Structure formats: C-alpha cells, structure tokens
Image (cartoon, rainbow, N blue to C red):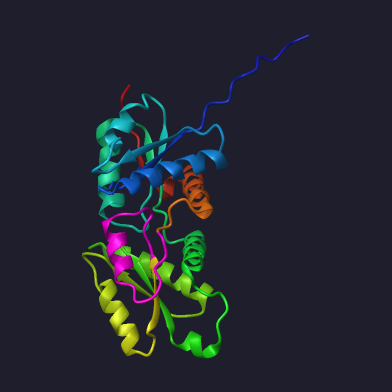
Amino acid sequence: MLFMKATRRPAPPALVLVAHGSRDPRALETVRALMDRVREQRPGLDVRLGHIELNEPLLPDTLATLGHREAVLVPLLLSRGYHVKRDIPEMAAEAGVRARVAAPLGPHPLLAEALHARLVEAGWRTRMDDATRRTSAVVLAAAGSRDPQSKVDTGRTAQLLAERLGVPVVPAYATTAAPTVPDALQALAAAGRPRAAVASYFTAPGRFATESAEAAPWIASAPLGTHPAMASLVLHRYDGALATPEATRERALATA
C-alpha cells in the first residue's frame, strides 16, 4: 500500500497595514486596534503594521522583518494619491521584498456604511421630515491631495454616502485641495442648507480630523477608526490584490 506524504500548505502572504503616521498619539492607538480587528476576522493571518512617516514602526523597518516572505501592503488611505502611487511601492522596492500594493480603501460601499454609522452615533437622525431634509446636508471632510484622482475617489464616496442619507454630501478638504471644510459649510448655508453635519473621512484621529470637526456648526462624526466595516474592507483589499495581481502594483525584486 502506498502512502501519500502530506504536504504542508504554504502560509499566505503577510498583510502589512500601511498607515500614514501622526503626531497625535490616538492615531497609533486606533491603527493598532484596527489591526487587532483584522486579526480577529482572519485568525492565523500574519498581520503587521508599518508607517510612511512620524510613527514607528516605519514601513521599511517592517518590511525588513519579512525576510523572504511575500506580503500584500494595504494602504490605510482613502483615495489614490502620491503615497499610494509612489511612496509605498518605492519603499517596497528599496526593501528588496516580494510585495504587492493593494488598492487604497476608498472608494467602496463599506466606507459609506462606516461613515453612515459614525454620523448616527454623532446624532444624525435616520428618519426626518421633508422640511428637515430640505435644510440638511453633509460635508465629507477629507485630508486632500494634489492628485486629481484623489478628488475623483472622494467624490465617489460622497455620492455613495448621499445615496444612503438622501441629502447632498459635499466633499471638502483639510488641506491642499478645495473647497475647504469651512467654505463648503458656508456654501451649503447660503444654498438653504444650514443644518450641515461634518462626516470625518479619516481613518484615525489627528490634526486634520480635529480641525474639520471644530468647523462643524452642528454635529461632527468620529473618524472611521475600528468600525467593523473597516477591518472587512482591509481584508477585501488584501484578497483582491491576491486574486488580481495584474491590477496591483507588484514589486518582485530579484534577491536570489
């Protein structure tokens, strides 16, 4: 009788969460908590963290711990831009690792789900009469980028959120791009929608999220943080990078 020798299935590529980094200590706490949620949803998956700047571990240091393992880098960024297109792939290339860069988190319906939930937590009424609805709106407060594709992505998320809420959702930015959050709020008030909420389109607390919330004339939601949809979306991007490598920025460097 012949016995087949059991072969061990190779471990899946590591998932490296790539956060921007912030001087606000709450940002690092939030990202670490999100990492724990990802691990809870996918037990056994090797999940690591690296930052582009400001916080440790920095992404190059995290990549250096991988050795010969393959990894998928999932940016905790909400749109396309310089960090996704240049910084992260270049750091992976310089580290000499076999890595794929997944798509940024946004746009995606799961983000609209998380944004909606955060607004409800802040006091947004899921049911309102017609008169209230006609005077209500939301400003989607994002970080901002010079990359025009970033504005396209943020605009798509605003559209997805507007479809859920049934009121206008206007993208606005904390820096670099226009309109600013205060300008968007002023324009809505002039258009007869003074009951405007600010939806925090940030993955974690920080300076821009705080300044955007402070501009709100009414309610402001908390950053997306550890909402369950965020962990699900991280894993969706990870799986997508593995399933369609031609749609990712794969960096395979010859180290042999």
Residue lying at the far right in this picture: please name it: 1
Q: Position of residue 79 (x, y in %)?
A: 35, 59
From which residue to which does the magenta span run?
200-222
Inspect the magenta stretch and tell me whether residue 216 lies in it.
yes
- Would residue 8 be found to the left or right of residue 222 on screen? right
The answer to whether residue 111 is visible is yes
Camera-side residue of 111 and 240: 111
The image shows residue 171, relative to residue 9, as above or below, that is: below
* Image quarter (top left, top right, bottom left or bottom right) of the C terminus: top left
Which residue sits at x=78%, y=9%? Answer: 1
The answer to whether residue 74 is visible is no
Q: Position of residue 61 (x, y in %)?
A: 28, 31
- Magenta region, mostly helix, strand or loop? loop
Which residue sits at x=69%, y=15%? Answer: 4
Residue lying at the far top in this picture: please name it: 1
Q: How many marks?
A: 0
Q: Position of residue 255 (x, y in %)?
A: 31, 24
- Would residue 200 be found to the left or right of residue 12 on screen? left
The image shows residue 71, relative to residue 231, as above or below, that is: above
Camera-side residue of 128 and 240: 128
Which residue sits at x=27%, y=34%? Answer: 60
The image shows residue 167, relative to residue 14, as above or below, that is: below
- Which quadrant of the structure image shows residue 189? bottom left
Inspect the magenta stretch and tell me whether residue 44 lies in it.
no
- Which quadrant of the structure image shows residue 136? bottom left
Camera-side residue of 122 and 6: 122
